[in-house]
Image: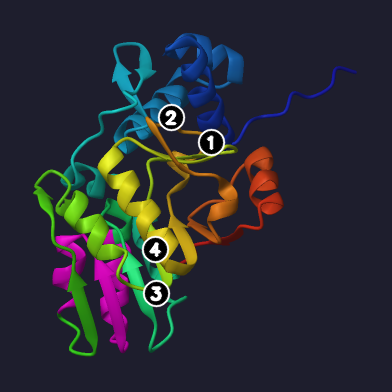
Amino acid sequence: MARKRHRLTQQERHAQILALLRREGTVRIATLAEAFDVTTETVRRDLDALGRSGALKRTYGGGAGRSLIDEPGIGIRSRAKATERALIGATAARMVAPGDALMIDCGSTTMFFANALAARHLHLTVVTNSLAAAQVLGTNVECRVILCPGDYVMREGGVYGSDALEFVRRFNVDRAFIGAGGLTADGVTDADSRSCSIKRAMMKCANQTTLLLDSSKYDVVQFEHVCPLMEIDGLVSEAAPHKRLAGRLRDAGVKVAIARE
């Protein structure tokens, strides 16, 4: 009797599509449907979802690898995977205790975290380079918000540069919450060098670092390497990493929390 072929989950298909894009540069719907033993409509939905998340560029009949250095502005990114990112933000907000000192970097997922954190009305001190995070956390009278100085970048909604980096290094905090453009077995990556510098500075000031990242970023490689896995303490995502990545995270001592409703 012929052995029944294993049917890949959506998450496994997405991981294989991104791996193929890194090798080949482009993928075709018909080829993927045959390889995965699924309908072309299923593959089309997979590519549409990856396109909306920014993991690839949707093309006629398939998809192409995204630019390593360019990504949509924060307004567009915040609309992609909004449900998943809201879950991630709410789960991460529950990890914060009254009296904590935090750093929050500028990003679409960390913005959802700031919204959820503000709703808890905790006594906190927060250092951030995100204008949106500062504004929403400022609605909580129990929260002291310290906004970094620096060069304002409108498409990112935050401040960057040497002044911001020097300012961040003045503080010591309990936890840093950062986002990123990609997560692989080799570590955390992001498209923008200015953002990477802020993330690394915040991590050095924090006793613990928690990465907030939705599962569409698994196996995504972007321009700059932020840090190896061993330099983050926790990961919050809405879906578990695939087996290989989960093993590497476990070996690096990263505690993975899966966001639930």
Horizontally, residue 203 falls left or right of residue 16, namely: left
Residue at image point 38% right, 46% down = 180
- Magenta-highlighted residues: 111-138
Q: Amino acid at mark 4?
A: Phe
192 or 12, which lies in front?
Answer: 192
Q: Residues within 10 Å of mark 4 (few under 14, many from 20)?
A: many
State which quarter of the image contains the C terminus.
Answer: bottom left
Q: Amino acid at mark 2?
A: Asp
Q: Amino acid at mark 1?
A: Gln
Pointer 3 residue: 173
Q: Which mark is residue 46?
A: 2
131 or 205, which lies in front?
Answer: 205
Give the CA separation, mark 4 to mark 3. 11 Å
Give the CA separation, mark 2 to mark 3. 40 Å
Tag 4 near tag 3, CB within 8 Å: no
State which quarter of the image contains the N terminus.
Answer: top right
Q: Is residue 104 above or below residue 93?
A: above
Q: Is residue 7 above or below residue 239?
A: above
Q: Amino acid at mark 3?
A: Val
Pointer 1 residue: 10
Tag 3 near tag 1, CB within 8 Å: no
What secondary structure is found at the residue carrying circle 4?
A: strand
Give the CA separation, mark 4 to mark 2. 29 Å
Residue 50, percent from left and from top? 38, 32
Tag 4 near tag 2, CB within 8 Å: no
Give the CA separation, mark 1 to mark 2. 7 Å
Q: Is residue 47 above or below residue 261?
A: above
Q: Is residue 40 visible?
A: yes
Q: Which mark is residue 179?
A: none
Display coloring: rainbow
Residue 201, percent from left and from top? 36, 56
Q: Residues within 10 Å of mark 2 (few under 14, many from 20)?
A: some
